[in-house]
């Protein structure tokens, strides 16, 4: 991305500070370090890399980030956007749904869905993943790391990724400029953070429509604890409802290890 691209991105979005790197091991790791240099007025801050060599994922996942992928991390203080800590569990879903909404705008006829809590699937294959972390010395801040398969072809991915990944370029039949995708995601995220802050009912309706897991059998692991059952959809506060035998569990976090 050029200097001009970055200037136009800053003008068109709520991002106040941008750092662009041709290569990063992990934009999340860089953003966690960068946080120490940044004051509240510098946020939201965006760390963007053309290539990532050691992208990290949720749980034990790594993130396959080949050339052509869009990989970035956004450093924010949710309270500055009117989102207090008790609402943070819903942030994960908010981010995933904002990405799904933005990607739908590029692929209007495609089946773009949200796999709780924040993976975006297109046509049953994963197009985006999110890793949210907090800087150890600044618990009021979050690093929201986002990877979107824009032009990276899953053809060149490791075999375990190939079958379940898809890129926007594949869906649309040709390469896509990354800047409009990044801009659309950031703009949607700003709108949706404001909606979360006011608990706007449209947000929940959209999450429910996007939910890929509703009605399916799921196995979800969180800190070594496994929950297996049938997904009943999302509760009003964004928790995932899972029927396990006679009880209904409400989950705010976890990694979906299986679903069918
Ligand atoms: C997952 O699907 O498990 C989450 C993947 C998150 C990947 C993104 S790419 C940008 C940012 N930097 C990282 O190291 N990870 C996130």
Image (cartoon, rainbow, N blue to C red):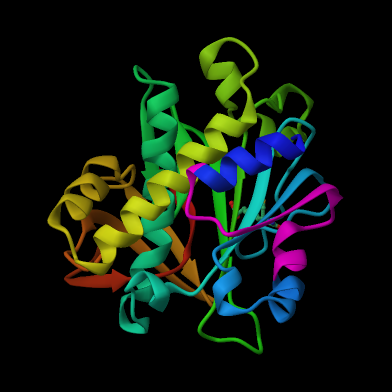
Q: Check the image and report above or below for 96 versus 36.
A: above
**Total numbered circles:** 0
Check residue 26 for magenta coloring.
yes
Q: Residue at x 74, y 33 (%)?
A: 159
Q: Whereabouts is ligand 1, in terms of quadrant?
A: bottom right
Report whether 242 appears left or right of 118: left
- Would residue 140 be found to the left or right of residue 113 on screen? right
Q: Please provide the residue range marked out in magenta.
A: 12-31
Residue, x 61% and y 65% (percent of image)? 59
**Residue depicted at x 41% and y 52%:** 189
Q: Quadrant of the C terminus?
A: top left
Query: Does any portion of residue 240 appear in the rendered image?
Result: no
Residue 98 can be seen in this image: yes
Query: In x, y percent, where is residue 217?
Result: 33, 50
Front one among 136 and 183: 183
Quadrant of the rendered structure where residue 35 is?
bottom right
Whether 60 is among the magenta residues is: no
Furthest residue to the left?
A: 201
Task: Establish if 14 lies above or below 28.
Answer: above
């Amino acid at each position: 991305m050029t200097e001009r691209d970055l200037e136009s991105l800053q003008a068109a979005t709520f991002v106040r500070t941008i750092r662009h790197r041709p290569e990063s091991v992990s934009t999340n790791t860089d953003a966690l370090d960068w946080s120490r240099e940044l004051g509240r007025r510098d946020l939201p801050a965006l760390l963007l890399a053309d290539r990532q060599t050691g992208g990290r994922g949720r749980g034990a996942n790594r993130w396959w980030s080949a050339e052509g992928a869009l990989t970035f991390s956004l450093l924010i203080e949710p309270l500055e956007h009117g989102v207090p800590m008790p609402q943070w569990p819903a942030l994960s879903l908010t981010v995933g749904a904002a990405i799904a909404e933005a990607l739908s705008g590029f692929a209007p006829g495609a089946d773009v869905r949200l796999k709780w809590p924040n993976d975006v699937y297109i046509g049953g294959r994963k197009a985006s993943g999110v890793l949210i972390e907090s800087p150890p010395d600044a618990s009021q801040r979050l690093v929201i790391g986002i990877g979107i398969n824009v032009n990276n072809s899953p053809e060149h991915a490791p075999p375990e990724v190939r079958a379940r990944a898809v890129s926007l370029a594949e869906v649309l039949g040709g390469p896509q400029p990354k800047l409009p995708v990044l801009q659309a995601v950031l703009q949607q995220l700003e709108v949706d953070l404001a909606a979360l802050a006011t608990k706007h009912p449209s947000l929940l309706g959209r999450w429910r429509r996007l939910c890929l897991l509703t009605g399916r059998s799921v196995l979800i692991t969180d800190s070594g604890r496994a929950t297996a059952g049938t997904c009943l959809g999302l509760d009003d506060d964004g928790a995932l409802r899972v029927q396990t035998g006679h009880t209904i569990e409400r989950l705010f976090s976890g990694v979906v290890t299986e679903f069918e």
